[in-house]
Each structure stands twice: as structure tokens, then as C-alpha cells.
């Protein structure tokens, strides 16, 4: 079993790092293989809306770290995505990452190959067909960390649909907001928030 932790915060010692480390360390204790991917330093270009993926078996024309990340996603069992809220939305690093997952969403190819998505790579001669159920069996949870104490705006943002899109691809388990976290790493001292992180981790790593 494998879990990947994605952290979208650019702050090296920020709360996102604490949160993703906590989830991954609980997963390791349960025997999971773990991988940490820093979305802030990964080279992920924004989607160009070229729709190349729609006519090329889900292959994204952009040749960057996302090719490798998508391969890793197809081989994992669970994902924790941690991101800060900027201007009442998930930050840019997380947005670019989520946008690029769009190339996974290949309904035409699901029909064409009956039960397979085509995993995106940058070379037409180097692709593999995976069962579309495989992605749907990957559990994903999202933890958002923010500065404000009041979570109303972020709750509205979550309800506005972004995470419904993730649910089209994966099995979304939990979406949590951890407020009042402007100080880098402060979340580690908050018992109530650590309990939320532990609950999210348990839901991801319990069979
Ligand atoms: C550009 C920017 C915009 C922000 N906007 C908000 C906001 O709209 N609401 C909020 O509660 N916090 C906001 N914050 C605060 C961050 O969400 C908060 O510090 C968060 O915990 C940072 O996560 P990190 O420690 O993982 O980097 C903003 C921070 C920055 C840098």
C-alpha cells in the first residue's frame, strides 16, 4: 500500500509541512510506503487548454514533472493534499496541480477501451491502459490551512464545486479546514487540530 502526500505551501517550515508529515508518519506506522511531493518546488506548468489530451488518449502535451506525478498517482492507494488558503481559495500551486489532473478525465477513452483510462505520458509510444476503477479506488483527502479564525468563506468555496471535480476521479474522503494558522508550524501545538489530522489519516490508511 502506498500513500502520497502533496503539500502546496511554499513555506518550507509551514503548517502544510507539519500536516503532511503527520499523515505520512501515521501511514508508515501502518506499513504504508509513503512519498512526499512538494507542489511548490515541482515543475508543473498550468494547463494550456489545448485539449490535446482529449484526442490523444489522455496524453498531456506539456512535458514537466506532472508526467511522473501522474504515473505515481496511478500506483498509489491514497493521497493527502494539503494546501493553504489564499484570498479565500486554495493557493495557486494546488490549483495548477488539480487543473492538470483534468487529462486523467478521459470519458471517451473509457468508452473506447471499455474499462480503461489511458495514463498520460509525453510519448505516444509509451502509454499504458489502466482500469478506470483503479483511480476511483484511490482515497483522497484534503486539508486546508488558513490564517483567519472564521472558516465561513472557505466552507463556501469548498461547496462551490472544486472538490466535486476531484470526486469524479478519486474517492474523496475528508475535506477539513484548520483555521488560525498564520504562524509557520503553529498547528503542531494545537491538540484539537492534531486530532482532526489524525482522523483524516486514519480514514485514509484504514482498509
Ligand atoms: C497571499 C496570501 C493570501 C492569504 N489569504 C488568506 C485568506 O483569504 N484567508 C485566510 O484565512 N488566510 C489567508 N492567508 C493565510 C494563510 O492561509 C495561512 O497563513 C496558512 O496557514 C499558511 O499555510 P502554510 O503555513 O502551510 O504556508 C493568506 C496568506 C497569503 C500569503
Image: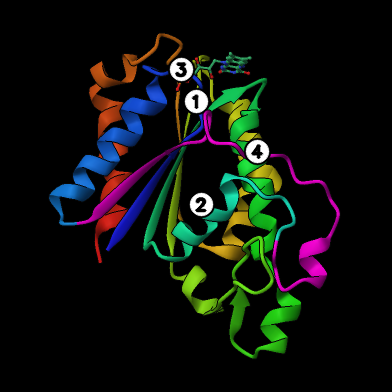
Q: Quadrant of the C terminus?
A: bottom left
Residue 199 x %, y % = 28, 44
| Residue 173 falls inside the magenta stretch | no
How packed is label 3: few (under 14 Cα within 10 Å), some, or many (20 or more)?
A: some
Earlier residue among tags 1 and 4? 1
Residue 103 sits in quarter = bottom right
How packed is label 4: few (under 14 Cα within 10 Å), some, or many (20 or more)?
A: some
Q: Report how many numbered discs are placed on residues in the image.
A: 4
The residue wearing badge 3 is: 11
Mark-to-mark CA distance, 4 and 3: 17 Å
- The residue segment tinted magenta is 32-59
Label pair 3/2, CB-CB below 8 angstroms: no
| Disc sitting over residue 95 in the figure | 4
Earlier residue among tags 2 and 1? 1
Look at the picture and state if 159 lies above or below 112. above
- Viewer-nearest residue: 176 or 63: 63
Look at the picture and state if 98 lies above or below 125. above
Q: From the Cβ of disc 1, is ligand 1 less than 8 Å away?
A: yes
Is 24 placed left or right of 119 in the picture?
left
Residue 115 x %, y % = 59, 87
Q: From the Cβ of disc 3, is ligand 1 less than 8 Å away?
A: yes
Mark-to-mark CA distance, 1 and 4: 12 Å
Label pair 1/3, CB-CB below 8 angstroms: yes
Earlier residue among tags 4 and 3? 3
2 or 1: mark nearer the eye = 2
Amino acid at each position: 500500500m502506498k500513500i502520497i502526500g502533496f503539500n502546496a505551501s511554499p513555506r518550507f517550515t509551514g503548517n502544510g509541512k507539519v500536516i503532511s508529515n503527520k499523515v505520512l508518519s501515521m501511514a508508515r506506522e501502518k506499513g504504508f510506503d509513503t512519498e512526499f511531493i512538494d507542489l511548490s518546488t515541482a515543475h508543473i506548468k498550468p494547463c494550456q487548454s489545448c485539449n490535446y489530451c482529449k484526442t490523444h488518449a489522455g496524453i498531456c502535451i506539456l512535458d514537466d514533472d506532472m508526467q511522473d506525478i501522474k504515473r505515481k498517482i496511478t500506483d498509489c492507494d491514497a493521497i493527502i493534499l494539503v494546501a493553504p488558503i489564499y484570498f479565500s481559495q486554495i493557493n495557486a500551486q494546488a490549483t495548477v496541480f488539480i487543473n492538470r489532473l483534468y487529462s486523467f478525465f478521459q470519458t471517451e477513452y473509457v468508452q473506447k477501451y471499455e474499462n480503461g483510462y489511458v495514463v498520460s505520458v509525453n510519448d505516444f509510444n509509451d502509454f499504458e491502459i489502466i482500469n478506470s476503477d483503479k483511480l476511483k479506488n484511490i482515497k483522497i483527502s484534503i486539508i486546508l490551512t488558513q490564517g483567519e479564525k472564521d472558516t465561513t468563506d472557505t466552507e463556501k468555496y469548498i461547496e462551490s464545486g472544486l472538490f466535486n471535480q476531484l470526486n469524479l476521479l478519486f474517492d474523496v474522503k475528508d475535506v477539513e479546514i484548520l483555521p488560525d494558522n498564520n504562524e509557520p508550524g503553529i498547528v503542531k501545538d494545537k491538540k484539537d487540530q492534531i486530532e482532526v489530522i489524525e482522523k483524516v489519516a486514519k480514514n485514509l490508511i484504514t482498509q
